[in-house]
Each structure stands twice: as structure tokens, then as C-alpha cells.
Amino acid sequence: MTAMGDVKRRRIDELAARAGQVPEGEGGVSLTKSAFRRLRRNPVAITGAVIVVLFLLVAAFAPLLAPKDPLTQYLLSEIRPGTIPGSREGFPLGVDNLGRDLLSRLIVGSRQSLLIGVVSTLLGVVVGMALGVLAGAFGGWVDTVVMRFVDILLSIPGLLMAISISVLLGQNQYALMIAIAVTQVPVFARLLRGSMLAQRDSDYALAARALGIRRSRIVFGHVLPNSLSPVIVQATLSLATAIIEAAALSFLGLGDPDLARPEWGAMLSNAQAFLSIRPELAVYPALCIIVVALGFTLLGESLREALDPKFRR
Amino acid sequence: MQRRPPRVLAAGAAALTAVTLAACASSDRDSGEGEGGGEAQSGGTLVFGAAGDPAMLDPAFGSDGETFRVARQIHEGLLGNELGGTEPVPELAEDYEVSDDGLEYTFNLRQGVQFHDGTDFNAEAVCFNFDRWYNFEGLATSPSASYYYQAVFGGFASTPDTPSIYESCEATDESTAVIRLTQVTSKFPSALALPAFSIQSPEALQQYDADNLSGSEDALSYSEYALEHPTGTGPFRFESWDRGNGEVTIVRNEDYWGEAPALDSIIFRTISDQNTRRQELQAGSIDGYDFVAPADYQSLEDEGFQVLVRDPFNILYLGFNGGNVPGTNANLALQDPRVRQAIAHAIDRETIVNSLLPEGAEAATQFVPPTVDGWAEDVTTYDYDPDRARQLLQEAGAEGTTLRFYYPTEVSRPYLPDPAAMFQVINQNLVDAGFTIEPVALPWNPDYTNAVQAGQADIHLLGWTGDYNDAYNFIGTFFAEQSNNQASAEFGSFSAPEIFAALAEADAEPDPANRTEQYQEANRLIMDYLPGVPISHSPPALVVAENVQGLEPSPLTAEVFSTVSITD
Amino acid sequence: MLRFIVRRLLQLIPILLGLSLLLFAWLRALPGGPAQAALGERATPEAIARYNELFGLDQPLYVQYLRFLGRAVQLDFGNSARTGRAVTEEFFERMPGTIELTLFAMLFAIGVGIPLGYLAARRHGSWLDSTSVIGSLLGVATPVFFLAYLLRLLFAVELGWLPGSGRQEVRIDATRITNFYVLDGLLTREFDAAWDAFLHLVLPGIALGTIPLAIIVRITRASVLDVVNEDYVRTANAKGLATATVRRRHIVRNALLPVSTTIGLQTGLLLSGAVLTETVFAFGGVGSAIFDAIFARDFAVLQGFILMLAVVYVLVNLLVDISYGLLDPRVRVR
Amino acid sequence: MTIVELPPHGDDRTGRPVLEVDELTVTFARKGEQPTHAVDGVSFSVAPGETVGLVGESGCGKSVTSLAIMGLLPRRGVQVGGSVRFDGHELLGASDRTLRRMRGADMAMVFQDPLSSLNPTVPIGTQVTEVLFEHREMSRKEAVDEATRLLDRVGIPDPARRLKEYPHQLSGGMRQRALIAMALACSPRLLIADEPTTALDVTIQAQILELLRELVVDSGTALVMITHDLGVVAGLCDRVHVMYAGRIIESADRHDLFARPRQPYTGGLLASVPRLDGARGVPLHPIRGSARDVIPWTEGCAFAPRCDNAQDDCLTEVAGSTVPLELDGPGRELRCRHPLEYPRSPAGATASGAAR
């Protein structure tokens, strides 16, 4: 061990430090941090996020953004059965079969559509998670009971379930939201329980238990937070399906009956009648639905990739 | 617990047998026609897109258009409708005489007519049918079963408390049937042109136990006769009914008494979705369909299809719940004539007619179409005048009155092609006039019809397509006195003795000329009282492919396909 | 293996019981309860009373449930309010159509999806890969009924290549044996009928199969990507096996495991989608019947159909589990 | 550069090496990240019946080297340079078909984790026989018999039954034996064992090593043993190459290496092995830092940052040249400017100690 001048030592150390970066520094970086690093690098994620944020903004400021009142029948007098005036000064996308400004209706419609999607998904997540935590945290017979129930819910195909619910609750937007939410519940319950069980048997949880930490603290302090990432992913994806399902329900005549509230699904199914005269009336709302759904899906998928260790390569 | 799995399996087994059973039924049903060949023979096959399945094919129990559409081809009544018109004309009866008191009708029957089962059509057969209706029992007497009989004849033998105007039918000889009534009614004999009063084969009726209804009022299960063996004298015979695919097949009645139809067969195929009907016509897999959306009239014409527009023979109105019936929370504001008038003035009928209804539609001034005797030139009219409406509302001190506005969803009626659109326009009108609207949307069947007929709405959209050319069939249906000096609950059971009187008087008037005047008087009274706002008469249309000839559109939507042929 | 199957069958029991309980509760929760649901709002109190007595609705709940269960097990769900026919009869009359349709849709989804997903994974990063990924994302995002309209507009109306509605050209008068039209056509040697029935499956089948297709492509791609990086694939290569062998025995086989489970889950999607697709294509299956039942508020039909469909769904998933067991030895012993 | 032939000790040594690796370089070039030199000019050779050890901490490039030899590195984003000759035939750049023909037949490999290295959905039997079908045209029956024989040979009891079983039904040791059986199926001339024992319990480790030794001895197979475990080396290898940061930093005959490690790193490795006969109180002497604290060879000795002997001239910018791999006495090579020095006294104890 020949003594070395501090100068050299420092020199080498800094070289080492520099060299240290050359291989990817996986060590020490927290999962979420690295996840977000990956997200920011992922163009898909960016695209999705941009779409989603854009539409959320539109929905939020719809009244300000909408150039016209979505309900006023501006050009009704010009409408003849079989002829609907197309786009023109002041009506960039044209008007619907009652002479209302299509653009404004699309903008304002985003509100209702997204609202239905978000609320119903939130509802599904909350209830589903409650069940999942119940099962995952306590296990034993609680687990069995809850999961049996969830399995039963799962055994009814989604839309059929939604149909039954909204037939039961009658036609209003809340019924619609609940109907969609119910179809989401079992998914989240299962998901959360699954990942919680996985987490519960994970080393750190064992370690915590070994250290004699209270179960509740382990569950809510360690297990739950760590189980959330799949839920977040699924929720993002569910938003897409929720919006599409809402459209499907209004096609089945089970949508929100309040015509004073424009909504893409309703606009779309209503426009089918004018497909031959003004396909735009159907195409635009359809595009809105598709793009938003796509946005959420992209975001969800890239979130999944970012959070799921399996995808890291 | 242990016993479950076998049960599940048992279920599976049951499933199998069920399928095979259904299958057997269908296979021998079809084995009548030659194997699988799709090639059309001489007259060819017409495929017609219907909006819904027939309920069954015994017109005596029928009340909806889809049932009658098919039944009309299979069955005939003593009277029929003039081709493309609304006047009753002799059909199975060659002619008839009415006694001076208007209570006894003597029908001279067509001779040498046979039912599809080969039995003879004669006076006995006629009376058998009349007696059959009069002697309905149990479920058959429920309004959902025998609506039209009750509308025309009242009660049954089994219901003494609601008397029937039918007294007797007597077969004085092979070809003469004498029908006696207990009172004169405008409905008779015109109503006999309704398919509900078709003369069917007594043989078949008995053999297949036609009157045996089961199930419940709203879920009637019909007899074997009604489902598999409807037997009449019409130009077409019932062939088969594929319920799974909603396909009713009828074939030419070779020994039809009249001119035998050109078509070999007609298939009525149910396509509930209106856009699908249009696209299927465009794709050429059907030859025509009914209830063309107004939006499609032009585009279909342009594509070379024949859009057959019927003369308007219907009425769309906005009904008021103007009376106050205990139980139904009627809107008291509507009892004030000024409020009712305000509504009438608020509605922009012209725009509605131009923008929402097909070409040929006209704004209505009263509750009967102009083509009906009894339509009055000089009724009080309420033109579109928002200011006047507001003013009236002010006078009534009813600004901002909240109205529960009922409208149907999931339906398209000849007089109301797009209820949602209609609602939104009228809603806008009323809001502009200073009303507050509380929309209530209900699925047409059964919720909506039940709700509005029970008088749950403040204002509601409804309409009527005439059954035959008689004003009473319109205004009588709406405004005749129901019980203890009240109108139907649909109109809030309002009480307007003079209107009730006028209608009753007209109904009982044997002389057509006088009757017409009395109807006109009734219409004036009605439009003064304004129990609702008549909005429009609109012409529903059928559409058929270029190569379909000879289909005569009927204002009653009572087309008969015997005259139709397909050219290549 | 047999024990595995039996055990899974036993696990069905609680599910089925729960299902029946759920739908029993559903009918009771309906506005006006079962009597109104069956008799309609206009029903007189006497009628309702009669009905209640008839169906024992005056009895305590558990008795009612047991009765309901008893009838359900005998597949008795009462009569349709719309047609007055036995719900079960209508179901079994229409189910074959739906089975044919979903089968076609599934085969379409699998037949196209797995190869596509595999190729996409093998050509990771190629244009084929990215297009199939984007395509699959779009597929999931498009409302089924809208897609259905577009398909028919294009292929039935504009191009006229394929029939756009129904199960069979109505002018063809085919003999019915099983109500599986394609099968019937083959059995009765009415091949033109069979072919025609098949053609009628194409458009609705594709519309219905799109979402499963999209999902299967994604899953296949992902799992192939996983598997190719597995050690045992490296081992196989180290053993110098022919590429074909490596793919067949070591990559595809393992890659299909997750796919097979998704396929099971997809049947749920299919049955849901059938309601929309069959309606748009006026296809005489259970889906369109449910649609009509919704409009007519035909609760008996809704209850019966949904319950029976759920059972079908459960059974299909059972089959999938079993096939999974066959594919993956690890499941069997566990 | 070539390696000095050792004086033959032991029997059946034809001079001709089975495998000659010359200046092998493997570079991973991921898009977005600058290329990393996983293997950087590695050269060595293996003669029939000889066992060569590649030793080093994880990430030092030994496994990559083996994969490069077998041609199992992924095509995309990897550049392989230098030369790998098998029986004088160049393998780098050889067609996929030739490589496949040779793999499993002439040269085989045993991997680290026996569970993940076996296909969970295919019975052991098939996984063995498929090699036989591939390289030795055998009938179904022959193949099965042969497979049974192989399993028996690697010491799997009741082989006939095992053939039908799936990997998850076997114990770790059994799996590794099965893998070895597959590797030996066509009695290859070269066997590469990549950490074959690390995933196993100690007792099993010994058995597996013993098995490998026997196989090599009585078949004369050339064996490349890749490990981080000096114990394994001591027990098995004739010749040892110590790798660090992608380069060989010291090569020597087993005994010499254990007796007199020259590279401080090697010394460190040996010093970190606990000894029973070590003087009481003398603490273990681990190496500072971790394998990540390296500097690129171009800037100097990669080990310098962790090295106690490090001097200024360990750095290129000071010495003016990178540290070369030079002859260091008979049969030894060394890459170090300030190696460990030893008094003349024989340090046999050291060797025997470590070699136990």
C-alpha cells in the first residue's frame, strides 16, 4: 500500500466516478422514478398523454371553447328532410339534423363523454379496490367470500351486465355511470387482490412482519402502495373501454336521455340515420371516441411497460 | 351440493333435446318446398323488409301494423278498402243493404269462395266468426287481445256490465248473412274493412283451438291457429314462419276467387333497425320496406328506387293533461285556456312540417286530416306567434310554468318519424315562449303508451293513423266521453259536455250528410276548447326496388300485395 | 387430468348458484317486481295477486328463490312478453346462430391474430410490427356498432361483395336440422345453402372479431417477445436444433399459454359484442333478441337469456382452463 | 498473441487445441447509449481433455465470451470481432446452418440456471431426444434408449420414468444433470459450462463438479469452466484465465496461480476466500468497491480505482500506453504494472489452502 498523493487519488476517483456512469445505473433509482424516466423517453406515452390532456382541457373549458351554443337550432329553418347544410361560415363542421353547430356539440359533448368515462371508472376503481383490499389484506374466509362474489360478477359478460343494471336503474346518466362502473369492479378487485397477495409474501413484507410491525401498517404502509401500479395501469385502460361502452349503451337506447346534454355516443347513434346524407355527423363523434380511447390506451399500455419489470429490456 | 354437477349436465342434455325439437319442427315445416334451390320461379318471390315481427296471424287478436300487414294478404273481410284509398268497398260481400233504422245489415255474399283449407266460405262461416268474437272469454276479452272488436262493438257476451252493440248474426241462406246491432254507430259497417274483422275458416279455427290464449295480459301466448295455421280466403296462403330469423313466408293462393296474384310468394322479413333496412334494400337483399325515414326519400329516389308516398291520413298532436284527475298529478295551469292557447301559439308548425317531416306533410288545423268527411274549414286556428304566446302566458300569470313534457324513444311512427327531434324542436319553441320544460323520455312500448294514457304527462306527443274514412275514428277515439262525463285520462279526463254530446250525436246519426256536419261542429268545439295542439299530418312512405310493379300505396297503410309483380 | 376437470366443474357450482341468486334479485328489484314485470303496468291488483299466488311470490324469499332455482335448473324462465313463447325455446332456437357467429369471429381473430402477432414479434421494430401494434390499438378503440355499419356500407352496399344482414338469403329455402345453418347445409348436402350461410357470417364475424383480434395480436406479440429471450430457447439453440424445431416446440408452444387464457376471456367480449353486431346485421341470434327484449322491456327474456349466456360463458372458460391444463403441465399438478 | 504451450502433463494430449480464441471482442451498441465493450481482446485456447477456467466477478465478460464462442449472441446491436477457431475452422461469421450443425454435436454448453434453461412445457425425454434426432439420425426407439442411457450416465436414477416427466417435477440437481446429459448427447469435443453450479446447493455442487470431471477425463472432452468461484477452479481447472472488465488480466497454471497470484485483483480474490488455517485475528482482506467502479481500459488499468498498488502510471495519460498483457514467467501472463511481489519462500500453504 504505497501512499499516493491526494491529487492522484482524487484523479482516479473522479475517473472512476465518470466510468461508473458508463454502464446503466439501475442501482438505487426508485421504481417510480425510473418508470417516469422510461415514460419520458417513450414517444408512445407522450402521444397518449398529449391526446388525453388535450381532451381533458377541452372538456374542462368546453363552454369557453365552444364557438356557439350547442343547443340552439340555428339553421333549423334551412333543413329539409334529406338535405342538411354542410360546413359554412360560422359552422366549420356543419350542423346536425336540427341545425345545431356540430363543432360546438362535439366540444361540449366531450364533457359528458369524459365525465361518464372518468366517473364510472373511478367508481369501479374505488369499489373494486375496497373489495380487493378486503380480500387481499385479510385473506381467509373474507377472501373466499369476496372473491366468489367477484367471480360471479365476472361470469356475466360486461355489456350484458351493464344492460341489466341500466334496465334496472332506469335511464339517467347516473344509472349509465353505475352500470359501466359495475362492469369494472370485479376487474379491479381481482387485480388488486392478486398483486397484494404477491406483495404480501414478498421479502420486504416478510421482513416487516419479522420486525413485528403491525399488520395494518404493513398492509397500508407497504403492501397497498406497492400493489397500486397495476391498478393505475388498468384504470387508464378502463377509461377507454368505459367511454366506448357508454357509446354502445346509448346505441342500445340505454344512454343518457337528457338531450340538453350532448354526448358523443348519443350523437353517433343518432347520426346513423343520416349516414347516407351527411356521414360527417357520424364520423366526427366516432373519431372523437376513437381518438380519446386510443389516447387512454396508449397511455395505459406505456404505463404498463414502464411499471412492469418484465417489459424492461 | 354433491347433486349439482349432474344437474348441470342434465341442463345440457335438455338443451340438446330442445334444439333438436325446434329443429324437427322447422325441418318438416320447410320440407314442403323443393330442396334448397334459390332460383325464383315464374312469378318470383318478393322480399319485404318489415320493421317488426307480427304478434301472430289471427287478425281478430291483432292491433298492430306489422300483424295486419301480413294478415291482410291471407285474410279478407266482408268489406275491404278501395285500392289506394280510404273508402270501404265490398270484398267477401258483394253488397249489403241497411235497414232504415240503421240496425240491420243484410250482406249478400260472394259465392264459390273457398278458404285455404278447402272449406267453403258462406253465411254460416260469416256468422261463426261474428259469434266467435262476441263470445270471447277470459284473456281473449282483454284489451291487449281483442282491441278492435271492443273499439267497435263494445263488450262481449261474457261481460254484461259493458254492453255490446252486436246483437246477432243470422245466415238466412247460403249466401246471405244478416247482422243486427243494438244501436246505430258510425263505425259500422266501415269498420268491417278492418283486418280485425276478417272472416276466417271455422274449420281451422276450431281444429287449431284459435281462442285458446294463455300467458298474461301483457305476455299473451297465442293458439296454434294464430301461429301456424291462419286460414282465410285471401290471395296468399300462409306458408311458414321462421321466428328465429323473423321471416314470414306466404305463397300464392292458386284458387283465389279474384284475380290470382302474380307473385309466387312473399317473404316478410323483420329488420328492426331502420338504417339496416335501407342498406339492405340498397344491397339488393330485400325488394322493399316500409316506414322510409324522411331523410331518405330523396336519396333513395336518386338511387332509382320507387318511393311510394301515401296520402297523409294521420294526425300528430301535442296532448294536454288539462283536467285534474285525482291520482294523476295533473298540471292545474293547463286548465287555464290561455295557457293552452299560449302553447298552441308557441309551436312553429311550419318549420316542423318543412324540416322534420317528409315532403307532402301539412300543418294540422284540427284533429282530423282534410281528406276525412267532417274536416271543418273554419275552426279556430292558432298561428305561430311567440309574442302572443308570451302575452297570453302573462295574462294567465303563468310565466315559467313547469311542464312535464313526455316523448317516446326507440320508436318511429308514421306520423312521428323522429320523436327525439320533434321533442327538441317543440321544446325549444315552448322555452322561447317562456315555459319551463321538464323532459321525460320513455321507451315507446310499453312504458310510454301506458304512462301517457294514464295521464302522467303534462304535455305529450302522440298521434293516430286512421283505420277507415270516418271522423269518429279520429276525434271519437280521442275525445269521446269515457265515463261519468269525463274524457280519456290521456287528456286529463277533461270535462266538456258539449263536445261529448256533439260526438255522441254524430256517432248515432245514420245519415252521412248530417253526420258530416255534426263532425264539423264537433271539430270547431274541440279547437275552441283546445284539449291539445294538432301539429301535422305527414305522409308515410314505402320504398320498393325499380323492378317491383303494381304496389298501390294506401293511406291506411293497408297495402295489398296481390297486384304486385316483379319484372326483370 | 380427469380429477382436474372434475374439480373445476365443482368450482362452478357456487358461481352458478350465485349467478342465479343475482338474477333472481335483479328481477325482484325491478320497478314493480316480477309480477309487474310479467303483467305490465296495466295489470289489475287482482291479476297481480293471482300471479303472485301462482308463482308463490307471497311466500318467504328463500322459498321463492328455491322455486326459481328449481325452474331455472329445468330451464324454465317463463314466457316472453313480446312473443308469448317460452324463453328457453327462443333461446335454443337462436343460440346456434350466435354460436356460429362467435365461432367464426373467434376463428378469424385467432387465425389472423396469432400469426400476425408472431410475425410482429419476430420482426420486432419493423414496419409490420408497428403497423400491427397501431392497428390493434385502433381495433380496440373503435365502437363495434360503428365498425359494423362501416363494414356493411363498404362491402355489402358499395361493393356488394358480401351479404349485409340475416343468417341466410331468404330466397334460399334450406332444410333445418340443427339450426346451425352452415352445418345443416353440409348435412343435407345443400352446399349452396351452406356456402350462403357461411357468407352471411363473414361481415358480422369480422366486426365481432375485431376487438379479440386486436387483443390477441397484442398478447401474442408480447408473449413471443418474452419467450424468445427465455433461457430454454437459448438452450435449444445451443443444442443446435433446426430453427423450425426451436420455433415450433420451444417458442410458439410457450408463447401460446397466455394467449389461450385471453381467448377464454374474449368469449365474454364476443357475447357482449354479439348484442351490437347481431342488431346491426339483423342476424337472428340471441344478441339481437336481447336488443329487442330491451326495447320491449321483455324482462323474462332478458333474465333468462343473460343467465343462460353467463352459464355458456362460464363453461367456455372452463374449457379454456382445461385446454390450458393440457398446454401447460405445471397447472395440472397444482 | 499466442499462448505458450504447457509441457504436457497427464495423458492423451495432442498438441492441437480444440478451441482457439484470438483477440475476441464483443461490443454492445444499443441505440441511444454509447457502445460498451463487454469483451475486449480476449485470447485463449483449449486442448482436448484440458479444462480451462474463466474466472471473474459477474459482469466481467466471461459469460458473453462463452456465448460469443457458441454464436448465441443476439444479432441486433452486437458486434463480435477477432477470431474463434474450432479445430482450425473459423466460427465467427460462419453461416447459421454450419453453426447449428456444430452446436450440440461438436460443441455443447451447460447453463447456469437449470430450471429456466429447460422448457417447462416439454418432457425431459423429448428435450434430450430432440438433440439426438437433430444430429445423429436415430429412430424413435434408438433415441429413447440412448436418452435413457444418457440420463443414467449423468446419474439420474430411474431414467426411463424421468424421461416422461417435466422439468418442474425434477430437483435442481436432477435438472442440471439432465442439462448435462443433453450437452453430452452427441459427445461433443468441447463443452462450455457457464456457472453450472451456482444455482445449486453446496452438496449438489460437488456432485455436479465431480460428474463433469469424470466426463471430461474419460471422454477427453475439452472443458471451458466459467465461474466466479475459486473453489470450483481449484477443484477442476488445469489452466485459469482471470478476467476483469472484459479483458484477461492474468493467466496461469492452476497451482502457480493459487501459489503466487500476481495481479492485485487475483490476490484480492484469493484473499477474500476465508481460510481455516489463516492466522487468528488476521482479518479477511476484501477488495474495495465493486465491479462497477471501473475505468475504460483506454484510460488505464480498469482495476486501478480499487487497487491498493495503483500508481500514477496505471493511467494511460501518465504511462503513455495502455497496460499490456505480458509474459510473466513460464506459462504465465499478466496485465499489471505493479504486481504483487513474493519472497523466494515457497507459498505452497497458500495454494493448498485455497485449492482445498
Image: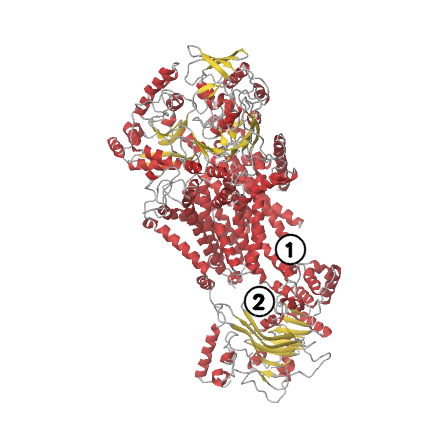
> Which chain does the numbered disc 1 sit on?
C
Q: Disc number at residue D74?
A: 2
Examine the rendering and report whether any part of residue A264 can be seen. Answer: yes
**Residue under the image location 42 percent in, 10 percent down:** B100
Name the kind of residue labelled 2 in the image.
Pro
Name the kind of residue labelled 1 in the image.
Pro
What kind of element bears circle 1? helix
Q: Position of residue A210 (x, y in %)?
A: 53, 62
Q: Is residue B405 above or below residue D67?
A: above
Q: Disc number at residue C329?
A: 1
| Residue projecting furthest to the front | B568
Q: Position of residue A138 (x, y in %)?
A: 52, 53
Q: Position of residue A2 (x, y in %)?
A: 50, 86
Q: Position of residue A192 (x, y in %)?
A: 50, 53
Q: Disc number at residue B15?
A: none
Mark 2 Cα shell of 10 Å, populated few (<14), some (14-19), many (≥20) = few
